[in-house]
Image (spheres, rainbow, N blue to C red):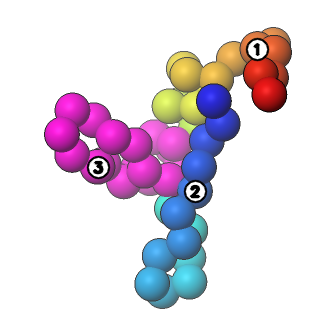
């Protein structure tokens, strides 16, 4: 898995996750913490 950023209508990108039945937009700090928890640096890429 790789993180995905979404381009908003204002031209700025943001990071969002699915949490249960809703989409939650994360701020910069929350995004960094989420990525560190879910994507390990040593994890092998699967193609």
Placement of 14 over or under 42, stated as above or below? below
Q: Report, in whole angstroms, how far the alpha carbon at label 2 lies from the one at label 3.
A: 13 Å
Q: Residue at x 50, y 53 (%)?
A: 15
Disc number for residue 5: 2
Answer whether residue 7 is visible to the viewer in this image: yes
Placement of 10 over or under 4, stated as above or below? below
Say left or right for 4 vs 23: right
Badge 1 local density, few (<14 within 10 Å), some, or many (20+)? Answer: few
Disc number for residue 43: 1
Identify the secondary structure beneath mark 2.
Answer: strand
Q: Which of the pair 44/29 is nearer the observer?
A: 44
The x and y percentages for residue 39 are 64, 23
Which quadrant holds the N terminus? top right
| Sequence-first tag of 1 and 2 | 2
Q: Residue at x 76, y 14 (%)?
A: 43
Residue occupied by mark 3: 23
| Sequence-first tag of 2 and 3 | 2
| Sequence-first tag of 1 and 3 | 3
- Please say whether residue 3 is one of the residues in the magenta stretch: no
CB contact under 8 Å: marks 1 and 2: no
Q: Which of the pair 16/1 is nearer the observer?
A: 1
The x and y percentages for residue 40 are 69, 17
Badge 2 local density, few (<14 within 10 Å), some, or many (20+)? Answer: few
């Amino acid at each position: 898995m790789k993180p995905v950023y979404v381009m908003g209508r204002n031209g700025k990108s943001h990071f969002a996750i699915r949490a249960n039945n809703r989409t939650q937009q994360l701020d910069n700090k929350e995004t960094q913490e989420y990525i560190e928890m879910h994507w390990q640096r040593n994890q092998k890429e699967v193609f």
